[in-house]
Amino acid sequence: MSQIAHGSIKSPSKFEPIRSYFSSQLIPLSVLFLIIVIASLLSPFFLTSANISNLLLQVAVNMVVSMGMFMVILSGGVDLSVGSILAVCGVLVAGLLRTFSMGTAIVLTILIGIGLGTVNGLVVSKLKVAPFIVTLGMMSFARGVAYWYTGAVSIIWSSFPNVQLFSLLGGGRVLGFVPIPAIIWAALAVLAFVIIRYTVFGRVLYAIGGNEESARLSGINTLRYKIFPYAYSGFCCAIAGILLTSRLGVGSPLSGVGLELDSIAAVVIGGTRLSGGEGRISGVVIGVFILGIINNILDLMNVPSHPQQMLKGAIIVAAVILSSQRMKKSRRTL
């Protein structure tokens, strides 16, 4: 009692949240810093304003998709269909621009993306099929839809009338420096942060990913809440498909091939536990930039695409190993 009276028991420091954040993100932040230093040493063009602007644009698609992938992995699932849903949405918005206004085409495309993601969530939650199997099936189905819709031929929407505003969506820049897609992915990152930090959905996703059975026994309707991450992933894929189609000038059924691996890698590299229940939005941003900077510097050095794929595969394996080691360490400390 005397110790309490004399104030020997201290209240938590106001800097504790900051200390906790840097502690949890120490590895991703260290890797990001190291890669930036190495990239700046390897190429004098890396830190130029033009390259930084291009980097913000280059990471846009993976950044948007990774926001949805983060939600899914946080809940203990995985979404292998993100690349194919992106392709469907990309060709769909290109085709709809032929007969509809830009706003109508975008809204319809987003609804289709959400619908495909919701189908994933319904099958996973209601029918209790493993997410890997469900999204693998959707990956094949959605890619087939993209080929069917286009006849396996890219839709060149840039030749349509009255599409100047849509072209700015993927290639325009604010103040001549900040790409519009960068503003969009930043807004989506803030939205994801608000959902995770300040809504019931966010708290429930952590609970389900940590231990779904415990969450269910505590009275949470886990089946209903597990639909949301997949629907949100579909929403993000639709946005990414729209941005990519706007940037390229065509809607291609080949878009998004391999994107599922990039987004999973970015999420795991950023410190999200692969089995769910642990992770931060800021870590996802860091993970996407780690991959983006690696690709950027390899492009600046004219490294062929095949070594880039090999390096990316090694990074994914290393990220999974670190994730599993982190999980084992946390179990030992419990």
Image (cartoon, grey):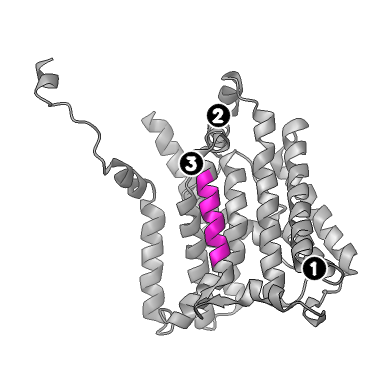
Per the image, the residue denoted by label 2 is 211
Left or right position of 137 against 170: right
Residue, x 24% and y 38% (percent of image)?
A: 13
The answer to whether residue 155 of the structure is visible from this angle is yes
Left or right position of 183 against 160: left
Query: Does the magenta segment cover residue 192?
Result: yes
Instruction: Name the disc covering residue 157, or none.
Output: none
- In this rendering, the count of numbered labels is 3
Comes first in the chain, label 2 or label 1? 1
Labels 1, 3: front one = 1
Instruction: Name the disc covering residue 101, or none.
Output: 1
Labels 2, 1: front one = 1
Indicate the quadrant where residue 255 lies. Answer: bottom right
Q: Magenta residues, as a range? A: 183-194
Q: Residues within 10 Å of mark 1 (few under 14, many from 20)?
A: few
- Alpha-carbon distance for marks 1 and 3? 36 Å
Mark 1 touches mark 3? (CB < 8 Å): no
Q: Nearer the viewer, residue 214 or 298?
A: 214
Comes first in the chain, label 1 or label 3? 1
Q: Residues within 10 Å of mark 2 (few under 14, many from 20)?
A: some
Q: Quadrant of the N terminus?
A: top left
Query: Does the magenta segment cover residue 103?
Result: no
Labels 2, 3: front one = 3
In the displayed orientation, state which residue is furthest to the top: 1
The answer to whether residue 311 of the structure is visible from this angle is no
Per the image, the residue denoted by label 3 is 197
The amino acid type found where label 1 is placed reads: Ser
